[in-house]
Image: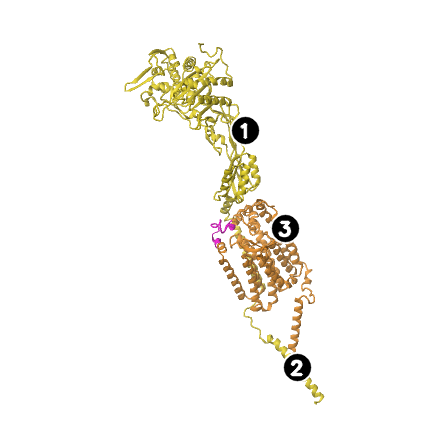
Amino acid sequence: MKPYDERVAERRAATETRRARKLEARTKKTAIKAARPPRPPRFKAGQPRRRLLVSLCLLVAVLIGLLVRVGMLQTTQAAGLRSAGSQQWTRSQTVPAQRGSIFDRDGAEMAMSIPASTVSVNPKEVGDEAGTAELLASLLGLDDDDRRSLRTTLQDKERGFAYVARQIDARVALQIDALGLRGVYVAREDRRIKPGGTTGSSVIGDTDIDGKGIAGLEMEFDKVLTGTSGEITRQVAPGGRSIAGSETVLTGPEPGNDLMLSIDRSLQFTAEQGLLGQVSAVKARGGSLIVMDTDSGEILAMTSVKRNDAGVYEVTSGNFAAVDTYEPGSVAKAITVASALDAGVVTPRTSFVVPWEKQYFENDPLLLHDAGYHPTQAMTVDQILVSSSNIGTITVSEQMGVEKQVDYMRAFGLGELSALGFPGESAGILEDAEDMQGTEMKTIAYGQGVSVTAVQLIAAVNTIANEGTYVAPELVIGTLDGDGEFHESKPEPSRQVVSPTAARQTTDMLKGVVCRGTAKRAQVAEMPIAGKTGTGLKAQENGTYYDDKGNKAYYASFVGFMPADDPQVTMLISIDEPPAGSGDRFGGTAAAPVFAQLAPAVIQELGLTPPPGGNGCPQE
Amino acid sequence: MNTSAATLKDRRRLALQRLEAQRRSGLGPRRVPHSASRVDAPPTTAFYVIALVVVVFVMLGLVMVLSASATALVNEGQSPFHYFNRQLLWTSLGAVGMGLAVRVDYDFWRRLSVPMLIVALAGMALPFVPQVGINVDGAQAWIRIGPLTMQPSELLKVAVVIAAADLLSRRILVLHDSRRVLAPIALLAAAASGACLVQGDLGAAIVLGAIVVGAAFVGGVPMFPLSVITASALATTALFVVSSERRMARFTALADIAGQKDHQSYQTWQGFLSIANGGILGSGVGEGKGKLGYLPLAHSDFIFAVIADELGLIGAFAVLGGFALLVYFGIQTALAAPDRFGMVLAGGISVWFAVQTIVNVGGVTGLVPVTGLTLPFFSAGGTSLFVSMAGAGLLLNVARRAG
């Protein structure tokens, strides 16, 4: 046994060793890290302070750069961008002015615009085609076909615009607008209506669906009636929908002026009905009628009727009384006689020997002749006119010569445009004497070889009624501006064509025409009437009076005025192509009865007082 | 004795490690915040300026959101206050978040940095969950929870800036160490930006990358490795752009904005029209035209164009100047921060706000491609506003203790 001390020392040593080992082990454990020499930093850490300041400068510099960029966009580069912008988000739109009304001489509306609405779509914007089509169709009352075509329209994404319904009742449109359907637009668009139906439509004419005059006075006075459209700008969202409240009115629309016509609406209506009745009774192609105030030339009624393709007679929207020309025939004899009287080459009692037919040119075998056979006889001028002798009238005309004949006819207003200025109005054809060929120089005396409009003819005969003074026909007596102020039309100058004496002498003869001549059927009780019939031959397309089948076409007319001794009103009736074979083909049979039929209404409407002594015709 | 000296050092190291572990797991003794004594000191100028700028921005943003969205909403048949009300709700939530971020000592947030990062990164996967995720304009970056939509990448911004600041301040002595600092930093940037790129959200990826790189820069990471990280991040971004025809077209359209105005650069062109319409004095609040429906996202990504339109160059100056103030006083706060964490945090947040503003306004003004990024504090968008306010709160938190 080892001594205690030794053992203690051993134990201690062992403990020491154990501890040392333990420590060594532990030291070793940690020393793995500690022992590894710290790796020398390859890169140096930055100084935060300096780096913060660098960041600050960099970032603020970029922010300043952005501000500069914004400033450039808002100043130096702004002009082009701004105009591109306003082009994109504002729309300017014209606001159509309300079209003026057309009144008759008493202020009764003959044509007027009433508020209506138009529904349109932008198929590109419509999302639910089927639903939109269904809703619109049911509100607008469309039938199945229209419904299908509407749906097809909505599905056509190439289109940016299509009408659905135009000028419909504003209340229906309001309902549609209230639905707020995408791509469906409702806009105000006035509708043009004629409260009197077709009454006066020959004169008034028509507007197209866009409210622009395309015929008649609507066309002639389109500028006056249209007014000045206004302009508004509005802001639109993409796709064109307006932003509520963004409308800015640049200029307000100025409504068009109203027209006041010389037409008497009730007389117009009566005249139309009378003419329609006669034209359909004689089965003619059409007809015209004009009623004119003798003193002023104001036209109180003016109408044209025609048989349409369906065989129904209707008032036309074309004013053929001013547009169509025809050879007036015997009515022109009154002009010839009045001219000869004025020229002083004849008196009413001057007598000529008149054969029933005559060859005028040796190289032209054509014989001119009167309407019916009569033996060669002496005839006064009065008799020539009353019996409407062609040869007699030529004889009268020969007394003054063809140059004077043409000059007088021009003075009566033939061959030149009337003051009406009606759209499409014709000047007729009246050649100068030196340009005339062959029998034309003779036949012009009885109204063949000259073509005139009904307006020219009534104005010419009216000159005789008006004591030899020509007054221009007038349809528009004035305009009413937006303030309701009346602006009278500038009166056309009148002119003395023949002397009052010549005119009165002719009038006396024309009385005879009605009393004992060709116009007996124009007679009315209590009212003396003067007038002249005409049965003109219509020139055919081949230049002769016979068509290719050898048939003639007639133009029967009557121009008369009353009271014969103090004429107040002149009336023209013409019947276009009464059946050639019938007894109704003559002015005296086709046209004159209309005068007698309408005279009471005219007398009533104009308040004419019949002179004492009845119609002035000797009782038979 | 050599050995015993080593032992003592060892023991101290072990003790410190144990304490650190206890502290990290929350079991250790509660430490008095090192800066507690300063909390009662009057706040610095930076604190007031930042707070003022944020309050003004948020209020102006509310007005502009209303102005920019009302007309288009009415045209769609909705309440004109739809976006405004939502923004107002998020403003109050943001105010709470901002208050928490200011009042709670930032060491608390620092301790939560790793869990927050994990949660935020996990959240980035949510948009891919069916019925939760929403695809907006090609980016799978939104989720819908009840009536609210949220953008997880926004939350990631806060988590990343805290995590980066924590990492860089803890490993301050080994900033050059590739394993302990460089790799984690690169990984953080890659994870955050990568998650955004996977979502298809290039804008958020750029901002997140910028936050990490900015924090690393401010935190003192050596220049060369930082440049390498930045360069590889940029290369990845470039690859991302080139990989998609759509993105590439957006990029090339920059060269010819007027020519492509109906196609690729429609939004930018509309932005131009709005900005130009404003002029120097602006067209007046509510008077802008682009927002009528021409300018896509007028109330969110392109709200700057509406501001420049309605408030003019003056308004643009106020906004960009306000951000400059924010950056300036943010950096001042970083410079005066009481510790390294606070410094990097303040610097990172400043870089975040600045970069996001630059990318957004740069897109609106046609200098960089439009990447779908909000303007902090202004754009309609709840998450963006909430997170911006929270970030500002953290900045204020540092500013309170600075000096």
Using the image, tell me which numbered label, if any, was put on residue A18. 2
Q: Chain of mark 3?
A: B
Q: Position of residue B142 (x, y in %)?
A: 58, 55
Q: Chain of mark 1?
A: A
Q: Measured along the vertical axis of the image, is residue A149 above or below residue B63? A: above
Q: How far is disc 3 from disc 2 in space, using C-alphas?
A: 73 Å
Neighbourhood count class around disc 1 (C-alpha, 10 Å): few under 14, some 14–19, many 20 upward: few
Give, as a three-letter code, the residue at label 1.
Asp
Palette colour of chain B: orange
Between circles 2 and 1, the one closer to the viewer is 2
Bounds of the magenta span?
B252-269
The residue that mark 1 highlights is: A483
Q: Residue furthest left?
A: A363
Q: Position of residue A345 (x, y in %)?
A: 36, 14
Q: Secondary structure at mark 3?
A: helix
Q: Measured along the vertical axis of the image, is residue A197 above or below residue B120? A: above
Palette colour of chain A: yellow
Q: Position of residue A422 (x, y in %)?
A: 44, 27
Q: Are marks 3 and 2 on the same chain?
A: no
The C terminus of chain A is located in which quarter? Answer: top left
